[in-house]
Image: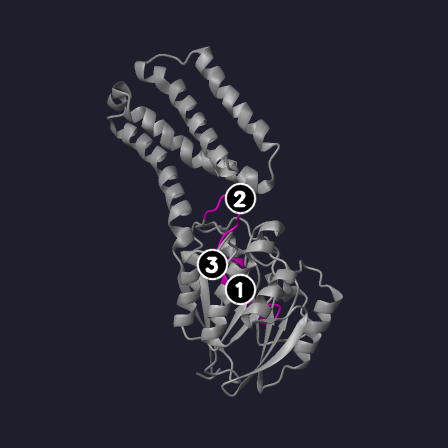
């Protein structure tokens, strides 16, 4: 039984115990100590289990308890005629609504928004790059290539970009699996290279540079691992510098690569810094035309007013939420990504739809 299934079964049991404990209430009776003891026992079990889990495992447990338990309690009410009679009032309808909202939100966050891919069109004012279209395919972060991933690539191809950048996290699987399954990713990237021509890749924090390079060799993509490369695209000179996966402090080779990129900056070329994490904005040694990154997934869960509840980055919440911003004098585009956090994490999106980026460079005066 998978970890997710274990959590789901446990959440259903918790909901059933709560429904059982509430049954006397519909008869205007107090729950017995035995019923209350069962509630206490399952809650203690939840706390004890949570203590053994990773951060994402705790989040997954909390998410299922918050969404599944109300659904099961609603079911116990639905099959109890006396409970339905007691709640056939205006306050009772409010109880129904309160119990109904979490399961509906859970169904949406688990089964609708994670697959509701959008195309994020952004205009970047830059005279040297006017007319250039850059596609961004960030954080595919999948356990295998399926229809959803193929559709994301097909949609990006349909946007007719001049080049595509992939700022890391192509997969999230263990090393033994990717050692066998990497040709799936190579085939997908090959389709992209065949259609677009220039595809540039770097590593993220869930994939590995060794297999990234193997995929690039097979597909014809270019890997910029602490490297700078010059491309001539329809009369436009584009210089792209890529880094390895870094937190706030840069490794020596990454810093050297970004210095070479900054040195290439002129009014006649487009300079792009490609980094998995947007934190690169804090340590770039010189100005560039645009930074492109991913990693944050737009927070994966965004709440009204508050924004992303977790960003996994030191940039501000509005920057981590995705889109085009300015940090430390450099423009930065942060993709919300195509996939989502895997492993023990709740594989949800709420208020942070997955996306492919389409960046259109235009004249600054226009």
- Residue 323 to residue 54: above or below: below
Residue at the (27%, 25%) spot, across then down: 87
From what the image shows, is residue 255 above or below residue 361? above
Crowdedness of circle 3 by 10 Å Cα count: few (<14), some, many (20+)? many
Q: Quadrant of residue 51?
A: top right
Whether residues under marks 2 and 3 lie with C-beta atoms below 8 angstroms apart, the answer is no
Q: How is the image coloured?
A: one colour
Q: Which residue is mark 1?
A: 186
Q: Is residue 202 left or right of residue 155?
A: right
Q: CA distance from mark 2 to mark 3?
A: 16 Å
Task: Please name the residue that numbered disc 2 is placed on.
Answer: 345
**Sequence-earlier tag: 1 or 2:** 1
Q: Quick one: SS at disc 3?
A: loop
Q: Find the distance from the CA under tag 1 to the CA under tag 2.
A: 26 Å
In this view, the residue in front, 221 or 282, is 221
Is-magenta flag for residue 352? Answer: no
**Position of 227 compared to 269: left or right?**
right
Mark 2 or mark 3: which comes first in sequence? 3
Q: Image height check: is 20 above or below 133?
A: above
């Amino acid at each position: 039984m998978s970890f997710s299934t274990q959590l789901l079964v446990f959440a259903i049991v918790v909901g059933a115990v709560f429904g059982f404990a509430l049954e006397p209430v519909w008869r205007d009776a107090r729950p017995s100590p035995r019923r209350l003891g069962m509630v206490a026992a399952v809650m203690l079990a939840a706390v004890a289990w949570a203590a053994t889990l990773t951060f994402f495992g705790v989040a997954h447990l909390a998410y299922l308890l918050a969404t599944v338990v109300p659904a099961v309690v609603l079911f116990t009410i639905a099959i109890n005629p006396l409970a339905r009679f007691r709640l056939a009032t205006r306050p009772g309808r409010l109880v129904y609504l309160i119990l109904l909202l979490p399961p509906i939100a859970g169904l949406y966050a688990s089964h609708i928004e994670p697959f509701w891919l959008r195309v994020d069109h952004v205009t970047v004012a830059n005279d040297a790059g006017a007319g250039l279209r850059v596609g961004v395919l960030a954080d595919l972060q999948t356990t295998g290539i399926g229809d959803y991933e193929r559709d994301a690539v097909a949609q990006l191809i349909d946007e007719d970009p001049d080049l595509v950048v992939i700022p890391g996290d192509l997969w999230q699987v263990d090393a033994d699996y990717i050692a066998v399954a990497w040709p799936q990713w190579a085939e997908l990237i090959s389709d992209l290279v065949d259609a677009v021509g220039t595809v540039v890749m770097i590593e993220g924090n869930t994939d590995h540079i060794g297999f990234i390079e193997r995929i690039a060799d097979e597909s014809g993509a270019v890997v910029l691992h602490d490297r700078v490369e010059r491309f001539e695209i329809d009369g436009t000179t584009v210089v792209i510098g890529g880094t390895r996966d870094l937190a706030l402090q840069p490794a020596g080779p990454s810093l050297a690569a970004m210095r070479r990129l900054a040195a290439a900056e002129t009014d006649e070329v487009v300079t792009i810094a490609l980094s998995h994490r947007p934190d690169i904005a804090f340590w770039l040694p010189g100005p560039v035309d645009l930074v492109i990154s991913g990693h944050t997934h737009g927070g994966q869960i965004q709440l009204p007013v508050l924004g992303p509840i977790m960003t996994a980055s030191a940039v501000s919440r509005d920057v981590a939420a995705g889109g085009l911003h300015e940090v430390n004098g450099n423009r930065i585009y942060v993709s919300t990504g195509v996939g989502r956090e895997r492993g023990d994490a709740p594989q949800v999106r709420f208020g942070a739809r997955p996306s492919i980026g389409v960046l259109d460079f235009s004249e600054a005066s226009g």
